[in-house]
Amino acid sequence: MATQHSRAAARLMISPAVLLLLAWMIVPLAMTLYFSTLRYNLLMPGANPFVGWENYHYFLTDPAFTTALVNTLLLVGGVLVITVVGGILLGLLLDQPFWGQGIVRILVIAPFFVMPTVSALVWKNMFMNPVNGLFAYLFKAVGLQPFDFLAQAPLASIILIVSWQWLPFATLILLTALQSLDSEQLEAAEMDGAGFFSKFFFIMLPHLARAITVVILIQTIFLLSIFAEILVTTNGGPGLASTNLTYLVYAQSLLQFDVGLGSAGGIVAVILANIVAIFLMRMIGKNLDA
Amino acid sequence: MARAVSTQRKALVTVVAWVIGIVIFFPILWTILTSFKTEAEAIASPPSFLFFDWTTENYGEVQARSDYFRHFWNSVIISVGSTVLGLIIAVPAAWAMAFVPGKRTKDVLMWMLSTKMLPPVGVLIPIYLLFRDTGLLDTRIGLVGVLTLINLPIIVWMLYTYFKEIPGEILEACRMDGAMLKEEILYILTPMAVPGIASTLLLNVILAWNEAFWTLNLTAAKAAPLTAFIASYSSPEGLFYAKLSAASTMAIAPILILGWFSQKQLVRGLTFGAVK
Amino acid sequence: MGNITLSKVTKSFGDVQVIPPLDLDIREGEFVVFVGPSGCGKSTLLRLIAGLEDVTSGEIRIDDRNATELPPAKRGLAMVFQSYALYPHMSVRKNIAFPLRMAGLDKAEQDRKVEAAAKVLNLTDYLDRRPGQLSGGQRQRVAIGRAIVREPAAFLFDEPLSNLDAALRVGMRLEISELHERLKTTMIYVTHDQVEAMTMADKIVVLRAGNIEQVGSPLELYHKPRNLFVAGFIGSPKMNLISGAEAAKHDAKHIGIRPEHLKASKESGVWKGRVGVSEHLGSDTFIHVHDTGLAVGEEDMVTVRCDGEMDARHGDTIWLTPDMERLHRFDDKGLRIT
């Protein structure tokens, strides 16, 4: 159907989107790259001399970087484990026939639509607060000392909050994938004498493999950039206990006004995200042909 | 698959599923309930679940104290504005890629996706400085621009997957029937594409509404949408549970309702069509 | 009207030439069928005529007008697609009226023509339904209705029956043939099914890899296949093709004999073999004969058509006698020896 004429028109129609995204990607990234080589602090106006790798050296050797990197990995890893395992179990459950399926589905999906600042605040104050929170009440009710979640286990608490937000996403995608499983395949397996666990490991899990990969990759992209939840609950603290890379760069550039150092951190974050992105693109690229 | 499931088993699944569903939904439910309590009841121990004096005064106070409606309006303008602008740019692009695919179409699509992978901190500083120097900081226009760009790849992809599903033969049929490009777009393509465009609109309004990196970093008082409005409640002096709950309920209610309508689109949009 | 002439038409996708230079003349009122195995370029050829693909070189003339550069909308042709390509958001009435609306006819005229077409195609009761509410056969009729209302110079059919079940297919085949008898408009019909080609065509164009292997009436193709490919493609069950010593006896590289031109006997004959599977159709019985000692390709099997009453058991010995008058001979290039 493609004729010469329509090709020219097509190029014209694609170009605004391409040019805008190109500008959006290249201009700020080039600026970040440039700033990262300068000694540039907004609180110290004047010349911004070129310092080469100094900012990178400073950023990468700062113990805060190592802490933030470890926290980032723990946060991403923890949330992924909880949401993928939870998502598979919930998906299997919701795929069964039961009364009120539609309503339960709506209940389970709801947290995804709660804005990050709201969920962080609600969890922080109404559940995890050591004096008035619901958890504190429950602890006291069974005779335990109330636990100050965000002070004593800040990262784990944030993992819990973020997992609550992303569990619906994983569940929804895995449920969709489960529903696309040909029931004749399961019936054939039953005819061959497979019980529930054999069906799960030999038929369902392989069928879900792609959806699981997609969940992991998409969530990783978003989880690497977790920001609002930390800002609202702990401000990265106590100390650096809940600071991830995104928050560290934010703190250095917009709280300490060190543009050069923040930019170097930004570039490091971009490189890390790209490593993940390459895997994701391969996945989705393959799917384009299908 | 019509197969008999024993009632007993179904009842068991029903109980388990409902319990889990309610546990997951509980924080939202609790927030909504607390928003109707007085401040004293909100922190009462033991907490009262349903048997308290229902009041709606918190809602009035939230509006009076921090002008909820202005922030609500900011959220509406920013999320709808960025989505509509994104659609205007994306519809022609997705149309061209779906119906006149070239050798590089796939590469262009993948490249667009790759811009979505760019972590926002990587470009936070230049954008912040550019906004500061051009007076875009704390303006709705500035945020509309940024959110348009960060959601553009998702919009293009969603539309692309929807347009791909319109069979090429139908477009060829209308050309054989005497339709030129204008009629093709007007009578065939638009009516068939409208449901897909509507779904895309819905999901992207939700994503933009809940976006909480750029909205927090690029706004102060004037253009702050609900994400930033709620964040202002995190300071200790603003710690009134009932009012916090009322504000939260108002911030999430509109999108919660839209969200329930857009479950399917969510899967499709956020997985870039890799899971259907 | 409805003369279509292709001269030196070629089509390449990138570096791959799918249609080498090709000439074809289609006369007014003819029912022409393009037939060939999948991937032979028959659909591409149809789409070139329709204008849905650009020709790489060469010229297409429709009614003595150069149409090579015309967009599909301006060629005055109508097409029925394999998937029917009905507009899902329009009622049957609006679907059929769409080409008329595009041609700018007034509402009353549109209605009149739609009603007339609906009556012919037994669609009157379904005019206000959506395509999604119709059966396959009804959708097919709507697609045909949409094609006939605009009174095109020629109809193009792209495998229109392949999505229908076997019983409906036979019925629709007859309806399309009748339509052609009544309208006397040129029709070009693409199919991979040689039975459809044989039963419907005035003229069959057999294609392989973009090349025209033979053009002729169904009976010409049946009686005088120009080469081995056409011989094997036309006719059902397929012609038995024999090479080796038996072919040499007839001064040929290959000989061919159709199953219906072999006589089977339990007592005597020219070739001896063993009965394999027998397919009983009632009127006829097709017997697959093995171990004939003839060089008949890999499966070593000769098919013979015999009387429906023929009683042959698996493993029985059977004798075959070819009708020498109906024996086809081919040379080492696979071409027919006359």
Image (tube, coloured by chain):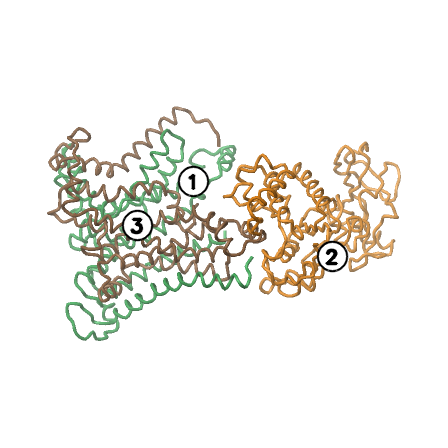
Which secondary structure, mark 1?
A: helix
Which is nearer the eye, B189 or A243? B189
Circle 3: residue type: Gly
Q: Do the residues marked 2 and 1 share a common chain? A: no
User: Mark 2 highlights which residue?
Assistant: C213
Chain displayed in brown: B
Q: Rounded to the nearest whole Å, what is the CA distance between mark 1 and mark 3?
A: 24 Å
Which secondary structure, mark 3?
A: helix
- Residue A62's disc is none
Residue A119: horizontal and vertical position, in percent? 23, 44
User: Mark 1 highlights which residue?
Assistant: A178
Q: Residues within 10 Å of mark 3 (few under 14, many from 20)?
A: some
Quadrant containing the N terminus of chain C in the rendered view: bottom right
- The picture's colour for chain A is green
Q: Rounded to the nearest whole Å, what is the CA distance between mark 3 and mark 2?
A: 64 Å
> To which chain does the residue with label 2 belong?
C
Residue A161: horizontal and vertical position, in percent? 24, 45
User: Mark 3 highlights which residue?
Assistant: A77
> To which chain does the residue with label 1 belong?
A
Q: Is residue A223 left or right of residue B3?
A: left
Q: Work out whether residue C116 can be spotted.
A: yes
Position above or below: C303 against A220: above
Which secondary structure, mark 2?
A: strand
Position above or below: B128 against C117: below
Residue at image location 32% in from the left, 54% down from the top: B82
